[in-house]
């Protein structure tokens, strides 16, 4: 899952939790606001009756104080204005048949759903009545009792919640949208960093990143630039070391070729001459025929060793591209394999592009890669047809493409993981030249493709 989506999902979760917390707080505050309204109503009515009480006390001083209140004047429109909606107030001690004086409750708030009306009282409890004395200095003046209407309280709480939730939802949506845009903008440079790392994985180590405003991203960008520089230096050093090792190997191959030619070649020629002399002498002298037979076997073994030696010298001596050029040396390589025996598979050579000006290490590498691939296809497979294609791709990415395909079967994955000397040598040469190698399955066999850059 993308990091932007993860952060946005976490942000939405936090917004949802905050919205839930706000809903719970709004429910509690709205529900308990009825208690505050009840207490306020009781206090206001008590203060109004206190003034009425002392007024009646002064005007009717001949009457007992117990008979001063209640008086009809207290149940007036002015008193109704002092009572909050959904609250009922009564005077105690009340006279017979006196009803509580209630604030407006019809149409108060919105009708809540049943689940809300049943759940809220369970968790928040019921409302208590509020009692206030009419006069703290005259206990006989009576008291004011305010009682909230439970249904009206729940309706007010529900309406309050709906109003708060509407605003909260709009704010949550705005916060989520703006925060998501901010997160996406803040993480936009991550794509640039990933693209740079992908180019580095393909070998383009010098990938300069832009300067980021964020300190953390700037540190990452600096680390990526430094890593690219070190990788390029290490690659250049490794390529130089590999080229030096190849040069040393070529010198050793030439020295070994000289030793084989001078020592083994001459000795094999001498053995062959001695064997022929022994065979001729035995035939003329009519001696034991077993000696002549042994001499012929020695001659045959010597011929076989000399043929193997010639084949080894062909592979060890200086590569033909230095003498004939790449195109002629490839033609000579294919012709030498074709002429060895008629039982060999068909070898098809396909040369494309201008190969005349290719020389030096690139030509030597191309020749060695083609030589090794052909050798592996001929010796380690049961191919009936082998295709060798050499193509020069001109343009900005001037490179030489070498592709060898055969129909001799084989497991491409196993061959690619092989650590044999031949394949290892091909990889070393191509790496030193800054190229690439791929081994893939082909129709009935394997396909080995190497790319050697010529621009360098």
Image: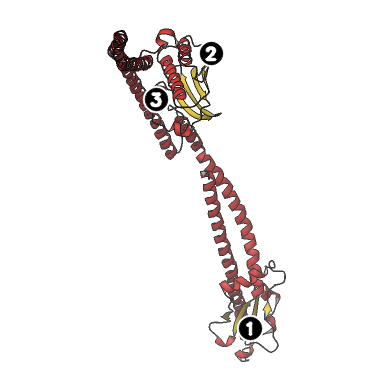
- Using the numbered discs, state the Cα–Cα distance from disc 3 to disc 2 in whole angstroms: 27 Å
Colouring of the image: secondary structure
Using the image, determine if residue 124 lies above or below residue 319. below
Which residue is drawn at the image coordinates 36% and 27% (left, top)? 234
Using the image, determine if residue 63 lies above or below residue 183. below
Return the residue nearer the eye: 435 or 138.
Answer: 435
Disc 1 target residue: 91
Could you tell me residue 200's position as x and y percent?
Answer: 45, 30
Could you tell me residue 309's position as x and y percent?
Answer: 35, 16
Q: Is residue 304 left or right of residue 410?
A: left
Residue at the far front: name it: 286
The quadrant in which the C terminus is found is: top left
Which residue is drawn at the image coordinates 64% and 82% (left, top)? 90
Answer whether residue 140 is visible to the viewer in this image: yes
User: Within the image, what quadrant is residue 272 found in?
Assistant: top left
Total numbered circles: 3
Quick one: label 3 or label 2, which is nearer the N terminus?
2
Disc 3 target residue: 422
Return the residue nearer the eye: 131 or 226.
Answer: 226
Disc 2 target residue: 353
- Using the numbered discs, state the Cα–Cα distance from disc 1 to disc 2 in whole angstroms: 113 Å
């Amino acid at each position: 899952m993308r990091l932007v989506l993860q952060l946005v999902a976490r942000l939405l979760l936090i917004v949802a939790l905050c919205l839930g917390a706000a809903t719970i707080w709004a429910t509690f505050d709205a529900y308990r606001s009825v208690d505050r309204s009840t207490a306020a109503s009781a206090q206001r009515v008590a203060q109004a009756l206190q003034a009425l009480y002392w007024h009646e006390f002064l005007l009717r001083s001949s009457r007992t104080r117990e008979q001063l209140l209640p008086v009809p004047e207290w149940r007036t429109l002015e008193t109704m204005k002092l009572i909050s909606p959904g609250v009922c107030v009564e005077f105690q001690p009340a006279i017979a048949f006196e009803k509580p004086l209630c604030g407006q409750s019809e149409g108060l708030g919105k009708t809540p759903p049943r689940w809300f009306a049943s759940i809220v009282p369970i968790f928040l409890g019921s409302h208590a009545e509020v009692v206030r004395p009419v006069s703290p200095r005259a206990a006989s003046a009576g008291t004011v009792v305010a009682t909230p209407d439970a249904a009206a309280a729940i309706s007010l709480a529900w309406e309050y919640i709906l109003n708060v939730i509407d605003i909260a939802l709009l704010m949550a949506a705005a916060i989520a949208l703006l925060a998501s845009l901010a997160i996406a903008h803040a993480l936009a440079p991550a794509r640039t960093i990933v693209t740079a790392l992908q180019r580095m994985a393909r070998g383009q180590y010098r990938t300069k990143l832009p300067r980021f405003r964020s300190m953390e991203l700037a540190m990452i960008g600096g680390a990526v630039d430094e890593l690219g520089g070190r990788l390029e230096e290490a690659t250049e050093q490794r390529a130089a070391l590999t080229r030096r090792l190849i040069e040393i190997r070529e010198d050793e191959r030439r020295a070994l070729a000289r030793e084989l030619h001078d020592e083994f070649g001459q000795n094999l020629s001498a053995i062959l001459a001695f064997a022929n002399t022994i065979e001729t002498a035995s035939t003329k002298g009519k001696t034991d025929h077993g000696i002549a037979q042994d001499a012929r076997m020695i001659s045959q073994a010597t011929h076989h060793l000399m043929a193997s030696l010639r084949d080894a010298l062909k592979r060890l001596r200086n590569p033909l591209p230095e003498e004939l050029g790449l195109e002629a040396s490839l033609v000579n390589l294919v012709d030498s394999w074709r002429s060895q025996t008629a039982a060999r598979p068909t070898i098809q050579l396909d040369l494309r592009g201008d190969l005349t000006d290719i020389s030096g290490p690139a030509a030597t590498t191309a020749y060695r890669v083609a030589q090794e691939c052909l050798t592996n296809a001929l010796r380690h497979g049961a191919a009936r047809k082998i295709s060798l294609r050499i193509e020069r791709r001109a343009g900005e990415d001037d490179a030489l493409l070498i592709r060898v395909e055969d129909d001799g079967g084989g497991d491409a994955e196993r061959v690619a993981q092989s650590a044999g000397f031949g394949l290892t040598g091909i990889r070393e040469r191509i790496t030193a030249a800054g190229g690439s190698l791929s081994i893939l399955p082909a129709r009935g066999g394997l396909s080995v493709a190497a790319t050697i850059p010529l621009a360098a």
